[in-house]
Image (cartoon, grey):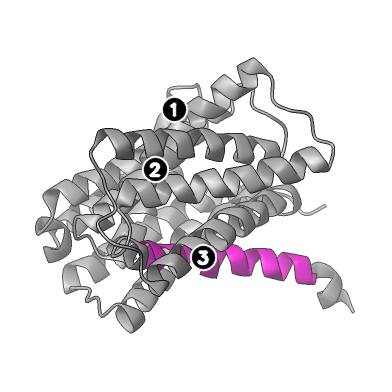
Amino acid sequence: MPAARRFPLQLIGAFFALYVIWGSTYLAIRIGIESWPPLMMAGVRFLIAGSLMYAYMRWRGAPSPTAIQWRSAAMIGFLLLACGNGGVTLAEHSGVASGVAALAVATVPLFTLLFGYFWGARNTRLEWAGIILGLIGIGMLNLGSNLQASPIGAAMVIFAAAAWAFGSVWSRHLPLPVGPMASAAEMLAAGAMLLAASLLSGERMTHMPTAAGWGALLYLTFFGSIIAFSAYMYLLKNVRPAAATSYAYVNPAVAVMLGIAFAGETIGVEECLAMAVIISAVVLIGLPQWRKQKPV
């Protein structure tokens, strides 16, 4: 049974969580913000998910983060979750289609390489070609009717991708808690920040969320945060980095199909061409990573 050994059920389940669950969170956000104020929903999502993960890790015997680790987790939580996920939530609230938002977030590997360069990382010619191609794709995406109709949303979603990338690179140089405790601390910190931003911005619940709104929040909390993040951590430990980050060019396709099927969204010719260019750019960036990994 060599195939079974090569592809255990845990590995298949982890890739399913990364591809399908993370790809579907964009639709869940779209459904949720019809009932919830955007920043409030994101804050509640991460505060609950972080609390559950923190309690579970402490029950498993994991040490509580030190003061320095809490500060580092707060900074990374601010960039990845408050700015990254919060930016996507606000962009969708401003009218950006869930599939287009996912496509813009697929540019994270491009920004990651760019920011990594300032920390001494040296990119290959293939990676630079991917960066240039990706920037062209971003330009094409902004020419589409969806982002042109919402320039503020366009700026938010590109900022969200850049913030996530910067936080990802910076996190490698900060003293963070070990393992899933890092995700728990980041979610707790980001959840508190998002709820504070919600309060300061004057967000208020004008009516009780619908059943779909509650369902979206629960889905984002348990599946989109706890399960998907845990699957990502598992893959980082058990497969090559390029395979673990391959969600960047699978999620947009999943999000686009779900948005068309369940939310009545439409994607224009410009967005379709931009999708092809951006996904090609991400594949180019991933190729050197695949080549560097030698089979053991």
Instruction: Tell me the quarter of the picture where residue 34 sits.
Output: bottom left
User: Whole-percent x and y of residue 128?
Assistant: 39, 41
Q: Main secondary structure of the magenta part?
A: helix
User: Whole-percent x and y of residue 164?
Assistant: 43, 40
- Look at the image and give the residue range highlighted in magenta: 8-29
The residue that label 3 is drawn on is 219
**Quadrant showing the N terminus:** bottom right
The foreground one among 284 and 265 is 265
Of mark 2 and mark 3, the one earlier in the sequence is: 2
Give the residue drawn at x 35%, y 39%.
162
What amino acid is at disc 2? Gly
Give the residue drawn at x 74%, y 48%.
237
Horizontal side of residue 255 vs 250, given as left or right: left
**In front: label 1 or label 3:** 3
Question: For residue 27: magenta?
Answer: yes
Of mark 1 and mark 3, the one earlier in the sequence is: 1
Q: Is residue 222 above or below residue 109?
A: below
The residue that label 2 is drawn on is 84
**Does residue 45 appear in the picture of this structure?**
yes
What amino acid is at disc 3? Tyr
The foreground one among 139 and 92 is 92
The residue that label 1 is drawn on is 117
